[in-house]
Amino acid sequence: MSIAVRAPAKINLFLAVDPPGGDGYHSLTTVFLAVSLFDTVTVSRVRAGDGLTLAVTGPESAAVPVDSTNLAWRAAALLAVRTGLDADAAITLDKQIPVAAGLAGGSADAAATLVALDGLWGTAMAREQLEELAAELGSDVPFCLHGNVALGAGRGDRLSAVLSRGRTDWVLGIALGGLPTPTVYAELDRLRTQRPLPGANDLTGVLTALGRDDPELLGRSLGNDLAPAALSLRPDLRRAMRAGEEAGALGQLISGSGPTVAYLARDAEHAITLAARLSAEGLFVSVRVVSGPAPGPRLSRSGR
Ligand code: C5P
C-alpha cells in the first residue's frame, strides 16, 4: 500500500524579527502564504523490521540528504516514537521546491510526511497532536501543515487566522545556490550591532490588502527584516530586487531567509509578462509563476 501527499512551498509576505532570545531563536511576526509550487511525498509499506528508507527524485533532488538529517526522515522517526510504532516505511520525495531557498521546502516535506504516514500507519492522530509534532520539527513546519495563509508569532510556529479574499499571483526568481537560515539570522544580528536597518513595518497594510483583495496595497506593504542580511550575504540579489521594479512588479521581496525573490503581479496574465521580463535579465536559474493561497498537505493518491 502507498499514499502520496502533495505539500506547497511558502513565502513570507511580512517578516518582522525581534532580537534573539536566550535560546538563540528570534521572536517573529510573520504572514505566511502557501503558493502553488509543490513537493510530493509518497510513503509505502515495507516488511516489519525493515526500517526507514528515503529516496529523492525530481529536479531539486541533488542537494537533498537521504538519511536522518533529512527533515522528512526526522518527521517519520518522531511520529513512530510518539505512537510507539516501529518506523517501517519507504519514503520517496519528489522535490520540485528548491533547497535552502527561503521557500520552506524541507518543512513542507516534513509536514507532508506526517500526514502521509499518519494515513499509512493508521495512527489517526488528532490535528493538535500533529501540530505539536510539527512545532518540534521546525519553526515553519506548523504553517506547512496548515497551508493557505496565516499569521505566525513566536518562532513562527504559533499560528492565527488571516482573512484573505481572492488569489494573489507571483513570480519566484530562484537564484543559484542556497542560503542557510541560521547564517542569515546571525548576519542580521551582526548588522544590527552596526547600524539601524530598514525593516518590515506595515503589517496592517498587508492584512488589509489580503482582506480587501487589493494587490496594489499589498505590493506597497510587503516587508522582510531578513532582507538586509540576505542582501549582505548575497549582494547579487540587489540587482534582482531592482529588476522587479523595472519590470513593473507591484512589489518584490526576499522570501524568508532567501535567496528566492518573490515578485507580486496584478493578476495571472501580468505574472506571465513579468516572468518573461525577469527571465530575460538572466539573473536566475529558474523563474516560476505561482499563485496563493495553496492548500496544506493533501492526499493526492493512495493505492496498493
Ligand atoms: O526552527 P528551525 O530549525 O527551522 O530553525 C532553523 C534556524 O533558524 C535556527 O537554528 C535559528 O538559527 C534560526 N531561527 C531563528 N528564529 C526563528 C526561527 C529560526 O533564529 N524564529
Image (tube, helix red, strand yellow):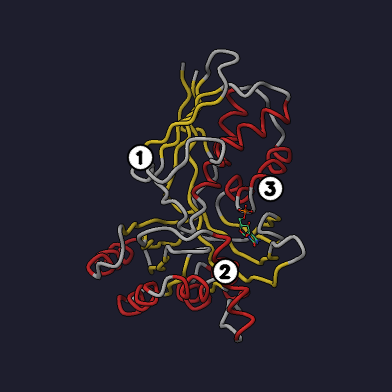
Amino acid type shown at disc 3? Ala
What's under tag 1, amino acid-wise? Answer: Gly
**Dot 3: few (<14), some (14–19), or many (≥20) neighbours within 10 Å?**
some
Q: Nearer the viewer, mark 3 or mark 2?
A: 3
At label 2, the amino acid type is Phe
Which residue is at 70% across, 68% downward?
A: 20
Q: Is residue 215 above or below residue 199?
A: above
* Distance (Cα) linking label 3 and label 1: 27 Å
Q: Is mark 3 within 8 Å of ligand 1?
A: no
- Name the residue that disc number 3 marks: 135
Residue at the top extreme, as displayed? 47
Q: Is residue 260 left or right of residue 119?
A: left
Reading the image, the residue beneath label 2 is 14
- Closer to the camera, 72 or 32? 72
Q: Mark 1 highlights which residue? A: 58
Which one is nearer the viewer's eye here, 49 or 155?
Answer: 49
Q: Secondary structure at mark 3?
A: helix
Q: Position of residue 281 (x, y in %)?
A: 25, 70
Classify the position of ligand 1 by quadrant: top left, top right, bottom left or bottom right. Answer: bottom right
CA separation in Å, label 1 and label 2:
30 Å
Count the labels in the image: 3
Horizontal arrangement in the rendering, residue 128 relative to residue 295 (left or right): right
Across and down, in percent, residue 214 comes to 49, 71
Single out the residue that lies furthest toward the bottom: 195
* Residue 55 found in image quarter: top left
Establish if 26 lies above or below 136. below
